[in-house]
Image (spheres, rainbow, N blue to C red):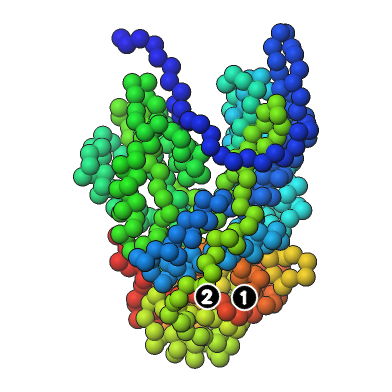
Amino acid sequence: MADFIYQEPFPVGEDKTKYRLLTKEYVKVVECDGRKILKVDPKGLELLSKEAYADVSFYLRSAHLEKLRNILEDPEATDNDKFVAYTMLLNQVVSAEGELPTCQDTGTAICIGHKGEDVWTGADDAECIARGVYETYKDRNLRYSQVVPFTMTDEKNSGTNLPAQIDIYGGKPGMEYEFLFITKGGGSANKTFLYQQTKALLNEESLTKFIQQHIFDLGTSACPPYHLAICIGGTSAEMCLSTVKKASAGYLDELPTSGNEGGRCFRDLEWEEKVLKICRESGVGAQFGGKYLVHDVRVIRAPRHAASCPVAIGVSCSADRNIKAKITPEGIFLEELEKNPARFLPAEAPSMSPAVDIDLDEGMDKVRAILTKYPIKTRLNLRGTLIVARDIAHARIKQMLDEGKPMPEYFKKHPVYYAGPAKTPQGMASGSFGPTTAGRMDPYVDLFQSQGGSLVMVAKGNRSQQVTDACRKHGGFYLGSIGGPAAILAKNSIKSVEVVDFPELGMEAVRKIYVENFPAFIIVDDKGNDFFADFKH
């Protein structure tokens, strides 16, 4: 039997993060039983949590914005790649004003903490962090997305965006408390996958084929370009999945690049380049065809049980909302995010072919007669009235049809936009109001179109074959809106918002909105063409 070796599973190297001092208050060093202890006032935890979730909702990392700028300078990027990247940069300029959050899905609040054994708070740390979440979502123009159950089938919105997911780990020596704060929207959370594999996967040919196949499971519903993470191995399924979440947030960037006899996790730089090449050559691009499905890739290799080989794939989306923090004897520190995103904009907008103008108020028949003239991937510029409805509203309308009631006229008269807004800032027509994932509404499309509704749909991401079949049968269209830039849509495109049905549903109520200069792309047409068909398996 080999000698005992303890190996830290994730031996992350030097922290190169640039921090800003939040405050020197709430911390002091005391002596107890001959050792120094860092005492942290619980109010300091509340403040840190509140500020972290506020910052990450409106600001992003400079490195992320620089990658968007790089797309604009790449001669191999398609017009659609560049249009998406440029729109995302413009969106961040709007968001950095501090009123309209980057994305309307302001996410589940997630906190991962590592507490040194010489840090004392004298409180329930998770409760303090949760109170900071509560205060930020109460005071800022964010959206409440958390749904709490009362029975297996009865649930409602919590109205606070609580509960948060808070995981605090302890045991390490020292007087430092480290944090990773994340706001994870439904789109990117839903694109986290676990595949239970075996040793047979661990050769170059099999692993390459596996990644080529499963990279398309991501689709575009989570708003690319992505920061893609893959973990191969893991002492358990949950360790594998947790590693992917941290890696996609850049939290494991300073891992070593080779393994050892102790079983440390490491980054495989060679496979990162291979996976990046696969993504570049996929053709999916930044949502509507091109090169930039991903910004970058992290591949983590981990130890495993001999009978298991879990593989996890996940992403951090275009709203790359991750922020690190720490509490030390010197004070409370928060990662410095980019407050001046305008510096990443080019002097001139990128040159692109013009979009096709569509007046949505000319009537559904005329709108469809115009759309049928253009191929998939055509960029559009929408003006006119949209009906906004998402999951619960669709379920209610289906129930009405099942009970023999007619399809509401608004669903037949106007295109439907799948979305749910954040809170509206004072003096504005709308809060951040980007599209939600189209695929969740796929089961309703054939029925609704047969009743004269949903004949033109606007949302984000790829859809299933049943939607393509329904559009071919009923003469419908699915238009893809850019996933991610919700702030600029609210500021520049959405001119009025009116609740027209189910007001008790809050952000899921049916709304009527008037839009101008609203960008979209033809994804599925009335002839059975689907932009994503080549990528489906």
Residue 471, located in which quarter of the rendered image?
A: bottom left
Instruction: Report the front residue among 309 and 426.
Output: 426
Instruction: Tell me: 78 left or right of 132.
Output: left
Q: Type of residue at label 2?
A: Pro
Residue 177 visible within the image:
yes
Q: Residues within 10 Å of mark 1 (few under 14, many from 20)?
A: some
Estimate the x, y position of residue 318 in percent, counting from the top left: 51, 57
Instruction: Report the front residue among 226 and 349.
Output: 349
**Residue at image location 45% in from the left, 76% down from the top:** 351
Estimate the x, y position of residue 199 in percent, counting from the top left: 26, 34
Question: For the residue labelled by badge 1, is the local secondary structure a helix, a strand or a loop?
Answer: helix
Which quadrant is the N terminus positioned in?
top left
Q: Residues within 10 Å of mark 2 (few under 14, many from 20)?
A: many
Residue under pointer 1: 493
**Residue at image location 68% in from the left, 66% down from the top:** 431
Instruction: Tell me: 247 left or right of 200.
Output: right
Distance, label 1 to label 2, CA atoms, is 9 Å
Q: Which mark is residue 219?
A: none
**Residue at image location 34% in from the left, 55% down from the top:** 279
Question: For the residue labelled by badge 2, is the local secondary structure a helix, a strand or a loop?
Answer: strand
Above or below for 226 versus 419: above
Residues at badges 1 and 2 in contact (C-beta under 8 Å)? Answer: yes
Estimate the x, y position of residue 257 in percent, counting from the top left: 37, 33
Which quadrant is the C terminus positioned in?
bottom left
Instruction: Tell me: 402 left or right of 198.
Output: right
Q: Type of residue at label 1?
A: Ser
Instruction: Tell me: 49 left or right of 303.
Output: right
Looking at the rendered structure, the number of numbered marks drawn on it comes to 2
Residue under pointer 2: 519
